[in-house]
Amino acid sequence: MTTLAISGLIRPLLEQQLPKDLDVRWFMSPEEAQDAVKGAEIGWFDMNDKDAMVATLRAATDLKWLNSIYAGLDFLPMDVLIERDITVTNGVGINAITIAEYVVMGMLNIAKGYRDVVRAQDRKEWLQDSPGKRELSGSKALLLGYGAIGKLVKPRLEAFDVEVTVVRRSGGDGVLGPDEWRGKLGEFDWVILAVPSTPETDGMIGADELATMKSDAVLVNIARGEVVDQPALVEALQSKTIGGGFLDVTTPEPLPEDHVLWTLDNAHISMHLSGRAQNKMFIRSATRFLDNLARYQRGEPLSPIFDPKLGY
């Protein structure tokens, strides 16, 4: 009998739909998780405590398939996944719709100065003019990363008549390769980061890249905080060498209360909420898991696959 170790938080969405010929071990704490995964072939043990997830993975010595709602699993020990030849399915695409919508929202918010409109409402002040006068129409966006999120960002921006240029590792017709985009940074009004967190993307936007951007360009980061050299970004925002930043992610998270980013009017911090701005995340994850479970029992390939050798 196949043994599954699964977080009890997802139990209401799964229990009645799981095949009866499974040994299912539900757990509610990190301690229970480490006990539940002993001898388990399949594991789904997402937790807010990443260290606890790592400890649980190390305890799961018989694991063959690890499922996760997280798209980015860079915090897990890749060597363990590789050495044990564990198949990993992640949450890529689960939050893509709402994150893509967040990108559009953030860009419109900055373009129209809408944060100042909300503040004026809080003051009960009737503004006589718009605090933001930019239009998305006719602007140019550089989109770094064309995975599940990037593929949804592009058509949404094109619906606003934004000219979108895509950067892909593999290159291709109509896109820029990894060695081409830096020389063209100064052409874009928006630079959108939707890349996975890997050693290759760590600090890919630094002082040199920020200095190359247009003085009114806006950096939109819905990837990971580590993708940007944050001290260099703070300096660029303070000196206004770029127009602003819409930052769904920062380093660290949560951002400390005394961090200078909170004080900058041209920094818009959305506290890594983009993927949470929905009510379908767990439903989508449960549906995908059940579909993959049926595939697993039939000996068919699972999807989407996280490759620990690549880190995404």
Image: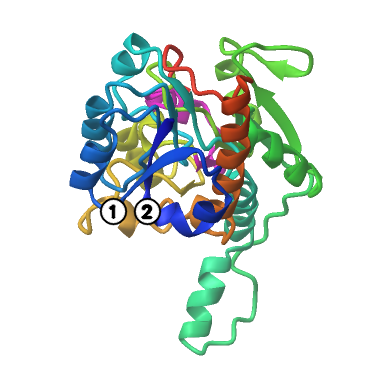
Residue annotated with mark 2: 8
* Amino acid of disc 2: Gly
Q: Position of residue 212 (x, y in %)?
A: 51, 26
Depth check: 68 or 145 in front? Answer: 68
Q: Which residues are magenta?
A: 202-222
128 relative to 63 in the view: left or right: right
Q: Is residue 267 visible to us here?
A: no
* Amino acid of disc 1: Met
Q: Vertical placement of 82 versus 158: above or below?
A: above
Q: Secondary structure beneath disc 2?
A: helix
Quadrant placement of the N terminus:
top left
Q: Vertical placement of 202 versus 35: above or below?
A: above
Residue lying furthest bottom in this view?
A: 124
Q: Which mark is residue 277?
A: none
Q: Is residue 13 visible to us here?
A: yes
Q: Position of residue 268 (x, y in %)?
A: 45, 55
Q: Position of residue 175 (x, y in %)?
A: 72, 19
271 relative to 16 in the view: left or right: left
Q: Looking at the image, which residue is at 48% across and 76% down?
A: 119
Q: Looking at the image, which residue is at 56% across and 42% down?
A: 19
Q: Secondary structure beneath disc 1?
A: loop
Q: Mark 2–mark 1 contact, CB under 8 Å?
A: yes
Q: Position of residue 304 (x, y in %)?
A: 59, 28
Q: Looking at the image, which residue is at 27% across and 43% down?
A: 252
First in sequence: mark 2 or mark 1?
A: 2
Residue annotated with mark 1: 28
Depth check: 20 or 211 in front? Answer: 20
